[in-house]
Amino acid sequence: MQELHERQQNQLIEAAIRSEETERHRIAEALHDEVGAILSSSKLHLQGINASLLDERGKQLHEKGKELLDEGIQKVRGISHNLHSNILKEFGLNEAIRHFVKKTIEGSIIKATTRLDDSYTTLNAENDISIYRMVQELLNNILKHSKADEILVSSTYQNHILEITIFHTGIGLTQQQFEELRYNKDGLGLKNIMNRVILLRGKIEFFSEADGYRIRINVPINTTAT
């Protein structure tokens, strides 16, 4: 009976995650194809204005408008790439994590380092997407809430276990706080992380240490997966 309940729960979680991933791709394509196209067209129209005919105030506004449009175009591209998993499919989990860390931390004062075990190669694309989304969510939470000045993302792959560790020097969660918050109505991101952990038959742990906080994810890797 317990086994049947767990199987049904996993099927529901898997369906929810697949639905979420489909929606992410739909939004990513809409942002890129529709919003991105509108912004690019607006930029072309703005560039068509002869700035030499404007007064000083008009020139300032014209220049500022171009800067804001460029920033908007870059933001849309960044969000679209984060929602889509193309880089994950093309280059694998490690390269996708490295890219996400680089692009997310870029321009901030946070020092971010990745030390990933390249002996791990993709065996199951859907599992890698779930692992990648967990890392994304955890790093976004750290950036939003922790006030950290250093982040280290590392991984090891031994005995068919992939272990990913995220260490940061800011304000973090303990295991008890994570368990409490994931049931909170505002803890949707944490609940999604736990759903992915359950689906992967993995484990996630939160530790408070003298110089910061550590999050450890362990995922068993089925070497017969395709």
Image: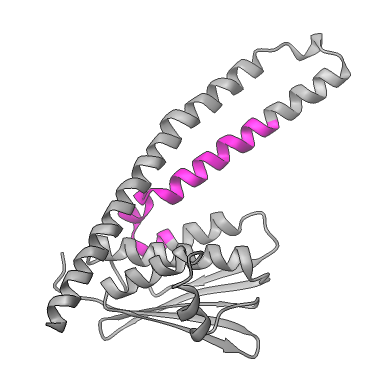
Q: Closest to the observer: 212 or 195?
A: 195
**Taking 202 as reference, is 168 left or right?**
right
Q: Is residue 112 found inside the magenta-colored segment of the image?
A: no
Q: In this view, which residue lies farthest toward the bottom?
A: 210
Magenta-drawn segment = 67-96
Residue 7 against residue 122 in the figure, above or below: below
Residue 68 against residue 103 in the figure, above or below: above
Which quadrant of the structure image shows residue 91? bottom left
Q: Is residue 89 found inside the magenta-colored segment of the image?
A: yes
Residue 210 picture location, percent across and down: 64, 91
Which quadrant of the structure image shows residue 12? bottom left
Q: In this view, which residue lies farthest toward the right?
A: 56
Residue drawn at 19 percent across, 65 percent down: 11
User: Which image quarter holds the N terminus?
Assistant: bottom left
Residue 121 picture location, percent across and down: 29, 68
Residue 153 picture location, percent across and down: 50, 73
**What's the coloring here?**
one colour
Residue drawn at 23 percent across, 58 percent down: 15
Residue 180 picture location, percent across and down: 48, 79
